Amino acid sequence: MLTELEDSFSSLEKKIVTVSKNFQNLNEKYTDLSREHEELKEKYEEERKKNQILAEEQKNIKLYSAISGNPDHNRLMKNHINRLIKEVDYCIAELQNTGL
């Protein structure tokens, strides 16, 4: 009976050691993955900002092209002018409402 208990305790101790090692390994992997996740988030934000800058530059290039007389971008120029006119009209209306 005593030897059975010692064997059981020995087996249980081995399992506890194995589980502890597995826990440590998983904890290390979690730490590594968390670090990698943060790095990827930073890279994603950098790329998103670059993408926004490039989109704005592309928009400006099309506008400059339309201003220079490129017939492919005439509609873009007309839309931009109409948007600017609406903004000016809105500003004038606001100034009239404030009594200036």
Image (spheres, helix red, strand yellow):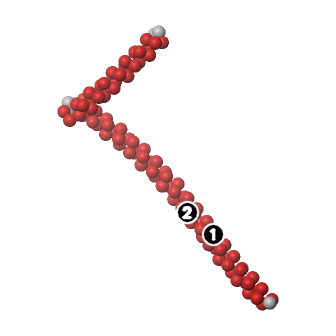
Q: Secondary structure at mark 2?
A: helix
Against 50, residue 93 (above or below) is above
Label 2 crowding class (10 Å Cα cut-off): few <14, some 14-19, many 20+?
few
Tell me residue 53's x, y (percent): 38, 41
Quarter holding the N terminus is bottom right
Q: Do callouts 1 and 2 mark residues in contact (Cβ within 8 Å)?
A: no
Residue at image location 40% in from the left, 45% down from the top: 50
Tell me residue 42's x, y (percent): 49, 51
Residue 42 appears left or right of 89: right
As shown in the figure, which amino acid type bears the numbered disc 1? Gln
Label 1 crowding class (10 Å Cα cut-off): few <14, some 14-19, many 20+?
few
Label 1, on which residue? 24
As shown in the figure, which amino acid type bears the numbered disc 2? Asp
Q: Nearer the viewer, residue 67 or 82?
A: 82
Give the quadrant of residue 51: top left
Residue at image location 65% in from the left, 74% down from the top: 19
Give the quadrant of residue 70: top left
Residue at image location 66% in from the left, 72% down from the top: 20
Label 2, on which residue? 32
Against 96, residue 49 (above or below) is below
Inter-mark Cα distance, 1 to 2: 12 Å
Give the quadrant of residue 16: bottom right
